[in-house]
Image (cartoon, rainbow, N blue to C red):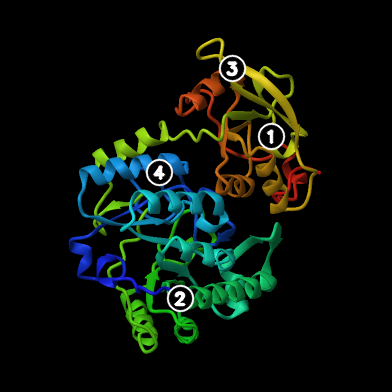
Amino acid sequence: MNPNPPDLSRHPCFDADTRHTTARVHLPVAPRCNVQCRFCNRKTDCLNEGRPGVTSAVLTPRQALGYLEKLTGRRGNIAVTGIAGPGDPMANPQETLETLRLVRERFPEMLLCLATNGLDLAVHVPALAALRLSHATITINAVDPAIAARVYAWGRHNRRVHRGEALGRLIVERQLAAVKSLKEHGILVKVNAIILPGVNDHHLQDVARVVAEFGADLMNCLPLLPVAGTPFHALGHPDSRMVARVRLQTGRFLKQMTHCARCRADAAGLVGEDLSPETAGLLQEAAGHGQDPSRQFVAVATLEGALVNQHLGEAAGFMVFGPDPSVPDRFRFVERRLAPACGGGDERWLQLASTLQDCRALLVSAAGPKPCQVLEATGLKVVQMEGLIEEGLAAVFANRPVPPALSRQFQSCGRGATCGGTGTGCG
């Protein structure tokens, strides 16, 4: 147990009054995610969109510490450092724990927190407690496995991909175990819940009741923000009557938070404050313009080694390129890597992401929306283009979009009516 309970009045997300005076910063060090929510479409390069899962750069732990040092030097009211993505912190446990360790050593009095879906959290709670994590937010959208199965398209746990009610049972079990463990270690717990009209709006009072029994301290019921291109976009935004009803029902069991600003994964400043140009510049500077040093290469789908001209699902392998240290602005072939066997659904693309884990981007002539979604959730950017490999590499390594004349968007895989559209690749 934590012998020194956290001072709740210092955390702007847990205390409505503190949000006016105390600032927080999110360090975007966790690009990979272990679930696919049906309401989420994450981006990592949009400065003008304010919602969870969005960041303008991904930092390494050392970069994050350097950024925090510069930011606190300019803003004296930052009292909280959190990790909230852009994926899930505990799908990136090494990066998350190392970042928190570095921050704790450099800023002994800083409050540390994280926001997670909870699937992979419980096993790491002792380590987080040892780092004096004081606050944790878990997004729990259901305690009924059947409802949870509707919320999540897939989840990856212990290197296995789960779907349907099996996933629903797993995620409910792991989330509640995480709440229990956090409270046993003296960590304050806020439960976020997305109000999904027709899916869980009448169920969230059960969520509140159950998580309260497990010791949760606070609940934040957020109306769905419909995001284009997601399965739940058609649900629409809950109206004010539904939101009020849900908060009234859940408030019978837990104190409600109502000042949430849906913070980005790189949020900095007061709650609700936009990322300032100065702060955005510090973030980009820390990231080396968003380039992760651990991702040194770019993979290419090509038939002959000169052009980007192969569909992702049809490629049997990929040529991997890196900068040529002897010639500025030129690139060298590193090796060829085989693609996973066709079939297997999302697991195929997760295997490919592992194969290309040191690549910052994958250049293909076309790729379906489902594999793009899975790959980009791991931090691997999929670039659809046709043309010279050299031109694509030059753009990616300079952190620029490919020239408009080369850019392409997915239309079909080329097999026309014979394609089953399973998203597993041809064959």
Residue 36 placement: quadrant: bottom right
Question: Which residue shows up at 33% across the image and 78% down it?
Answer: 256
Mark 4 is on which residue type? Answer: Ala
Q: Element under label 2?
A: loop
State the SS at label 3. strand
Residue drawn 46% across the image and 24% down it: 398
Q: Do the residues labelled 3 and 2 touch (CB within 8 Å)?
A: no
Q: Distance between the residues labelled 2 and 4?
A: 29 Å
Q: Earlier in the sequence, mark 4 or mark 1?
A: 4
Give the residue at x 45% y 60%. 131
Q: Is residue 409 left or right of residue 260?
A: right
Which numbered tag is attached to residue 311?
1
**Residue designated by label 3:** 331
**Closer to the camera: disc 3 or disc 2?**
2
Which label sits in the foreground, 1 or 3? 3
Q: Name the mark nearer the viewer: 3 or 4.
A: 4
The tag earlier along the polypeptide, 2 or 4, is: 2
